[in-house]
Every structure is written in structure tokens, then in C-alpha cells.
Image: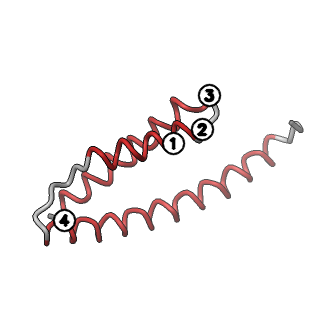
Amino acid sequence: MEILDLEEIRKEINVINNQMLLNFIKRMELSAKVAQYKKANGLPTLDRKREEAILQNVADNTPDEYRQYALEFFRKMMDLSKEYQETLK
């Protein structure tokens, strides 16, 4: 791996952060639609099977050195999504 200047590394991180923010916003907008659907159909916010499938996919597709962090990241993101859905129901 090429060693970059710290400022160059931070510029790249900033680009990724902005992309992640846009994707997070899109994900939360979709979570609102999920909440509307679940409310209309009398479904609970928590879908344990769905969460387990997502986490399994993350575990299967993340290199070992990052796996525990990726799983924690997705768990937190799903917790935030459920929290938001609860406010909408």
C-alpha cells in the first residue's frame, strides 16, 4: 500500500464520509417507508430474521481484520433505523 501524505488521506476520508452520509440519509428515508408499511400492516418494528441475514451477509463479505467493526457498524445503523421507525409509528 502506498503511503500518502496525511492531508491526502484526510481528503479521501472526507470524500468517503460525504458518500456515507448521503447513503445514510437514503437508508433512513427508506426506513421511513418500511415504518409506514409495517404500521399499515400491523407488523412489529423488529424483524430479527432480517437483521440476522444482514449481519450474516456483512460477516461473509468482510475481511477478518475488519469483521467485528463492520458488524458493530451495521448493528448500530440498524438500531438507529429501528429507533427512527418507532418515532414514526
Count of picture labels: 4
Whichever of callouts 3 and 4 sits on the residue coming sooner in the sequence is 4
Whichever of callouts 1 and 4 sits on the residue coming sooner in the sequence is 4
Query: For mark 4, what is the residue?
Result: 38
Q: Are marks 1 and 2 in contact (CB under 8 Å)?
A: yes
The amino acid pointed to by label 4 is Lys
Q: Quadrant of residue 49?
A: top left
Q: Residues within 10 Å of mark 2 (few under 14, many from 20)?
A: some
Q: Are marks 1 and 4 in contact (CB under 8 Å)?
A: no
Q: Are marks 3 and 2 in contact (CB under 8 Å)?
A: yes
The CA span between labels 1 and 4 is 25 Å
x and y percentages locating residue 14 in the rendered image: 66, 54
Q: Secondary structure at mark 1?
A: helix
Residue 4 versus residue 85 in the image, above or below: above
x and y percentages locating residue 25 in the rendered image: 44, 65
The CA span between labels 3 and 2 is 6 Å
Q: Secondary structure at mark 2?
A: loop
The CA span between labels 3 and 1 is 11 Å
Disc marking residue 64: 3
Q: Secondary structure at mark 3?
A: helix
Q: Residue at x 36, y 41 (%)?
A: 52
Residue 65 as seen in the image, left or right of residue 21? right
Query: For mark 1, what is the residue?
Result: 58
The amino acid pointed to by label 1 is Val
The amino acid pointed to by label 2 is Thr
The CA span between labels 3 and 4 is 35 Å
x and y percentages locating residue 54 in the rendered image: 42, 47
